[in-house]
Amino acid sequence: MNFNRYMKNLWYLAVGGMLLLSACQRAPAFNILGSYFPAWLFCLFVGILLTVPARVILRKYKLGQVLNPPLLMYPCLIALFTFILWLIFFRA
């Protein structure tokens, strides 16, 4: 009797999982020299590159001293640029 209940619960779990995952789409990717790289990796790389001029601008106007600690500020700036790029290019 317990085995039938177990199988019934397992069947409900499998069907529920299929219904939840049926709307998932394939993640955007770029083909670079035959290798596929995820789009978020591209956005992260560009976000890192955009943080360098932002740092220069912040230091030029002496805002780098106000925005402390830099160990926390620059990763947050990278994340900000990464998320903005993702929303601009891959918003569905």
Image: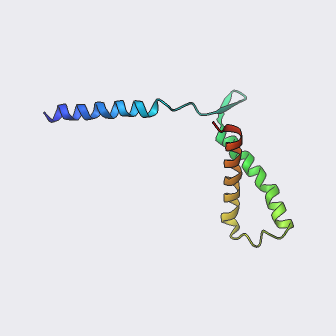
Of residue 42 and residue 26, the one placed in the foreground of this image is: 26
The residue at 81%/64% (across/down) is: 58
| Residue at the outermost front position | 92
Of residue 90 and residue 47, the one placed in the foreground of this image is: 90
The residue at 73%/29% (across/down) is: 33
**Quarter location, residue 28:** top right
**With respect to residue 33, does 64 lie above or below?**
below
Of residue 34 and residue 91, the one placed in the foreground of this image is: 91
Say whether residue 36 is left or right of residue 51: left
**Quarter location, residue 73:** bottom right
Residue 64 in the image: state x and y as whole percent: 78, 68
Residue 55 in the image: state x and y as whole percent: 79, 61
Residue 65 in the image: state x and y as whole percent: 77, 72
Where's the N terminus, which quadrant? top left
The residue at 79%/56% (across/down) is: 52
Where's the C terminus, which quadrant? top right
**Quarter location, residue 72:** bottom right
The residue at 75%/72% (across/down) is: 66
| Residue at the outermost right position | 60
Say whether residue 45 is left or right of residue 1: right
